[in-house]
Image (cartoon, grey):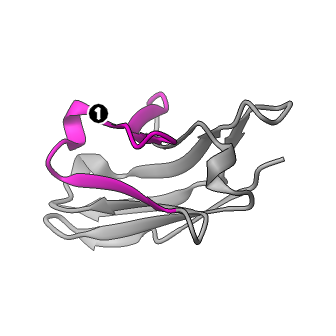
Amino acid sequence: QVQLVESGGGLVQAGGSLRLSCAVSRSIFSINSMDWYRQAPGKQRELVASITIGDRIDYADFVKGRFTISRDNALNAVYLQMNSLKAEDTAVYYCHADAPAYPTRYFWGQGTQVTVSS
């Protein structure tokens, strides 16, 4: 199994920055892709950014130019640097792993709350 633990959420003013971290219990090299999703109250969960084992990176249009996903293979961690935050970025942010090497394959963290005040 793969366990994911997010941290780094909090309350920030609009225009500010936060860095989310996701600690991964297994080697990142055993995982096809690591993703950040978010879910705002009353809305569906949506993909924010993803990074694959081959270093392909994709962003949702609404965060391009503001958010950066990265990973540290040695620490088995994935990060989401969020700059120029807007009130509409307020959501619970989830770390997600696509790990076909494991029977369950898809894993989620517990989420971390990000609140942006306007």
- Name the spot of residue 104 as percent of width and height, x first: 82, 32
Q: Is residue 81 visible?
A: yes
**Residue named by callout 1:** 60
76 vs 62, nearest the viewer: 76
Q: Amino acid at mark 1?
A: Ala
Give the residue at x 74% y 61%.
25
Judge whether residue 20 is colored magenta. Answer: no
Task: Where is residue 50? Give x, y as percent.
Answer: 42, 40
User: Residue 6 appears at what percent x and percent y?
Assistant: 58, 63
In the image, residue 52 sits, relative to residue 19, either above or below, namely above
| Residue located at (52% from left, 42% from top) | 53
Whether residue 40 is visible to the viewer of this picture, yes or no, is no
Determine the residue positioned at 31% across, 62% down: 81
Quadrant of residue 106 within the rendered picture: top right
Instruction: Answer left or right for 8 relative to 29.
Output: left
Closest to the observer, 7 or 72: 72
**Quadrant housing the C terminus:** bottom left
- Would residue 47 be found to the left or right of residue 66 on screen? right
Which of the pair 75/118 is nearer the observer?
A: 75
Q: Is residue 58 left or right of residue 92?
A: left
Q: Point out the stretch of residues depicted in magenta.
A: 43-72
User: Total label count?
Assistant: 1
Determine if the magenta segment contains residue 55: yes
Assess disc 1: are there few (<14), some (14-19) or many (≥20) residues with their C-alpha within 10 Å of its C-alpha: few
For residue 108, which quarter of the picture? top right
- The x, y position of residue 68, in whole percent, is 28, 54
Above or below: residue 57 compared with residue 66 = above
Task: Tell me the residue at 29%/33% (across/down).
Answer: 60
Disc 1, SS = loop
